[in-house]
Image (cartoon, helix red, strand yellow):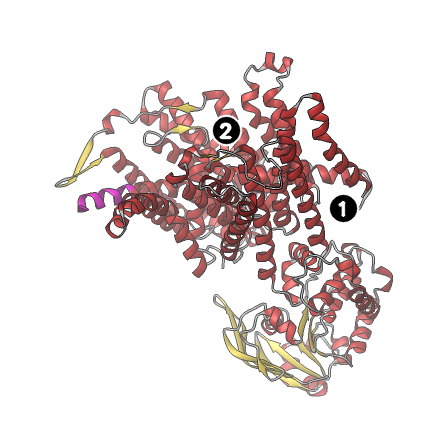
Amino acid sequence: MSWILILEQSLNGLQFGLMLFLLAAGLTLVFGIMDMINLAHGSLYMLGAFLASMFVQLTGSFVAGVLLAIPATALLGMILEVSVLRTLYARDHLSQVLATFALILILNELVRLVWGSDAALPMPAALSGPVELLPGLRYPSYRLVIIGVGFAVAALLYFLVAKTKVGMLVRAGASNREMALAMGVNIKALFTAVFGVGAALCALAGALLAPLLAVQVGMGENILILAFVVIVIGGIGSIRGALVGAVLVGMVDTIGRAFLPILLGAFFQPRVASAAGPALASVMIYLIMAVVLYFRPQGLFPARG
Amino acid sequence: MLQLRDVSKRFGGVVATDKVTLDVAQGEVHALIGPNGAGKTTLIGQISGSLGVDSGTIRFLDADVTRLKQHERVKAGLARSYQITSIFKRFSVLDNLALAVQARSGSSFSFWHPVAKEAGLFDEARTIADQMGLSEKTGALAATLAHGEQRALEVGLALATRPKLVLLDEPMAGMGPEESQRMIALIGRIRSNVTVLLVEHDMDAVFRLADRLTVLVNGRVIASGKPDHIRSHPEVRRAYLGDEVAA
Amino acid sequence: MKRTLSVVILLLAFPLAMQWLGYLFYVSFASRVMIYAIAATSLNLVLGYGGMLSFGHAAFVGAGAYVASILVAEGIASAWIGWPAAIAVSALLAWIIGAISLRTRGVYFIMITLAFAQMMFYLVNSMKAYGGDEGLTLPKRADLGFGLDLGNELVFYYVVLALLMLCLYALHRVVHSRFGRVVVAIRENEARVEAIGLPVYRYQLVCFVIAGAAGGLAGALLASHGKYVNPNVLHWVQSGTLMIMVILGGVGRLWGGVIGAAVLLGLEHLIADHPIPWLVQLAPNYQQHANLGVGIVLLVIVLFAPQGIAGLLKRRRGAPA
C-alpha cells in the first residue's frame, strides 16, 4: 500500500466529496428554509448533465456547454418551483415525498423522450492529461480542475451566505422561517431564488461529473441518496454541515472502496475478504450516518436550535 | 407533594427559568402567576418532563423525578394540560377521554381484543365527560367543539389519568366570561380529589381559587405565599399586579 | 361487511373462471397483485395508520425475498421453514432499523429510512455468492407439503389469497385494539400521547416491526411466485412504488393496499400489453414511457385527491372520513 495510492484515492475522495457538496448545498437549503422534501433534486442534476451534453455538441466547446447548462437548468428549476413545488410548501411531508417522486418519474421519461436514455459528454482534450503533483504522483488534471472549482464555489457560497444581506436572509429563513416572514422578507421571491441557485449547483455538478460517470436517465436517484446522507450527517439547513458532511462521505466512500478489501485481506482469508470487502465498503457511509445520528440526531451543525 | 429546588433552563443565550424554588402542598390549589414570557410554561414543561432541567432538582411524592421521562412521571401521578389546546382532533370526545383512561389502566400492548368492547373504559370516560360539562358532546368530533369545550376536554384528558397532581397551563386561555366561570367552577369541583398547580392570567380566577401563589418574573421567583401576602407585596405590585388589579 | 363478503366470493371464484376461460396467465397475475397487496398493506399499517413516513419499506420486502430464496437455493425448500424465516429476519431488520430511525423525526426520519434501505440494496448487490446484481434464479417454488403443489397456479393463488385475507383481518383487529388506538393517536398528536403516560417510541417501534414482518412475508411470496429475486426489489424506487400503491388506494384505510396494488399493477399491465390504436398513431413509443403516465396521475392525485381512491369511494357512500 503505497503513499502514492493513498494520496491519489484521497484526492479522488475529495473531488467526489466536493461535487456532492454542490448537490447537498442546494438540497439542505431547500429543506432548511422551505421545510420541503424534494426528491426531484437529483433530476436537476441529471438535467444539468444532459443539457451540458447537448450544449457542448451544439457549440463544440466544453466550457461554453457547461456555462450554458447552468442557467438553463436554473431556469427550468425555477419554473418547476413556481408552478408545482410552491403548492407543496404548505403540505405535509408525505405529500411532498409523493409529489416529488412523481416528478422524478415524469422528468426521467421526458428526458428519455427528448434525448434518449443516454448521452455522452467526453472529457475536454485539453484536460485529459495528467499533472505531476509530487514526484511519482501523477493525477488527472481534469479531476484537479473539479477540485478547484469545488473549492471556489464553496468559498463563493460561504461569502454569499455569511457576508451578504441576501445570505443573512437565507440564514434567517433556515433557522426560523416564521420569524423571517414576520420581519417582512419576501418569502416567495427568496424561495424561488434559493431553488434556482440549488438547481444551478446541481447542473454544475452534473456537467462536471459527466465525463467521469455515465450520463444516463436515473443517474439522479443514485447520487440523491448520498446527498441525503450528507445533509443528515451535516445537519439540515447548514452549508457548513453540507461541506463537512460531503467531504467526509466522499472520502470515506472512495477510500473505503479502495482499501477495505485490502485491509480485510490482511486479516481474513482471501475468499472472505473478497466477498466482505465490497459489501462492507458499500455500507460504510451508512454506518457512519447511523453513528452520527446516535450521538447527534440533529446532525453535526444543525441550523435550527 | 412537589418540591422544586433551583430549577433552571437556558435556551441558547436566553435564561427561561432561573433557580426556581417552589413547593406545592398536598390538596392545595397553588397558582403560578407572572407576566407574559416569565417562564411559566417553560417551568410547567420542566415539571411535567417534556423539557429538560439544566440544573436543579424536582421531587414529586418524595422521589427524585428530575431525570424521569414524561410518560414515567404521568404514571407516577403527575399530569398536565396545555396552554395551546392539544387534543386528538379527529377522535370523538369520548374516544379522547377513553384513550387517556386506557393509558392509565393496564397495558396497551394488546393487539387483538377490540377496544370498543371494553365498557369499563368508556363508562369512566363518560363520567369524566360529565365532570367536564361535556355530557351532550361525547359523540362529537373534538375538532367540532367550541373553544371553551375544547379547553374543558383539554383538562379532562389530564384528569383522566387520575393524577395526584395536575398542572393546568392557562386553562382559561381565550375564554369569554361565561366559559371562564364554568372553568372556575370545574376547578373548584376537582380540587377535592387532586392537587392543582394552576398557571393563569385571569386574576379573578386566581384569587378565588388559590390557596397560595408564586410569582414568576423573568424566570425568577420574586414572591411566594398566601393571596393577601402576595397582593400587598411591593415587588409584585411593581412588577405585575399594579396594572392588573384595581387597588 | 356485505361488501367484503362479495369481494371475497369474487376472489374465490376468479381463478376457476379464468381456468375455465383458458386465461391461466391472469391467475398468476392476480397472485402477483395480491402479493403486492400484502406488501402495500403492511406499509399502510406503518404509514397510513401510524403516520410514520418510512421510505425504506422495500428493505423488509427484499430481505424476506432474499432469505426465502437463499434457503431454497441452499436446498431448504420447505415453505414452513422458508417463510417464517423470512418473516423473522425482516422483523429483526425492522427492529434494528426502526430502533435507530425512530429516534429522529420528520424529514430526518424519511431520509434515514431511505438511506438504510439503500444500504441493504448495496449490501445485497455485493453478495456475489447469491447472484449479485444479476439476481438469483430458483429451481422451483417452495414446498408446502400436504399434497399441495405451489407450482400449480390455482393452488398458489388460493394460498396467497388465504394469506392476504389473514393479513387484512389481522390489520383490522390490530387497528381496533388498544395498541392500534395508541398508534393512530400518535399519528394525530404525538406529544399528547406521551403526556397521557404512554412511551411513544416503544409503540412506534413495535408497529414498525409488525409492518416489517408482514413485508417480509410478502417478499418471500414474491420470490416464490417468480422463482427469481434480484437486488432491485430493495431499491428505494420500489419503496416509492409501494408508497404510491398506498396513497392511490387510500392511506389509513383497510383496503387501501389492496386497491392500490390492483390499480397500479393493473394499469401497468394494460398499458404494456394492450396498445391503444389511436395512441399508437400519436406516439408510437408510448408504451415504453408508461411511467410518465404514472407520474402524472400520481402528481394529480397528491395535489387534488390526497385521500386516494378508497377515500373517494367512502365519501360517496356518505360515511364519515
Residue B74: x, y in percent? 65, 72
Q: What residue sits 76% from the left and 55% below the top?
A: B143
Q: What residue sits 36% from the left and 40% below the top?
A: A19
Residue A304: x, y in percent? 49, 56
Please identify the dominant SS of the magenta region.
Answer: helix
Residue B161: x, y in percent? 71, 71
Seen as rendered, the residue at the extreme right is: B136
Residue topped by disc 1: C321
- Which kind of residue does numbered mark 1 sit on? Ala
Q: What residue sits 39% from the left and 28% below the top?
A: A215
Name the one closer to the observer, B239 or C198. Answer: C198
Stretch in magenta: A1-12
**In the displayed structure image, the side of residue A134 where residue A84 appears, left or right:** right
**In the displayed structure image, the side of residue A219 where residue B130 appears, left or right:** right
Q: Is residue C87 magenta?
A: no
Q: Kindly state the secondary structure of the residue where label 1 is placed.
A: loop
Assign the N terminus of chain C to one quadrant of the image. top right
Residue A144: x, y in percent? 25, 37
Residue topped by disc 2: A108
Q: Quadrant of residue B59?
A: bottom right
**In the displayed structure image, the side of residue A303 where residue C259 appears, left or right:** right
- Which kind of residue does numbered mark 2 sit on? Asn
Q: Determine the chain carrying the residue at label 2.
A: A
| Separation of marks 1 and 2 at Cα, in angstroms | 36 Å
Seen as rendered, the residue at the extreme top is: C281
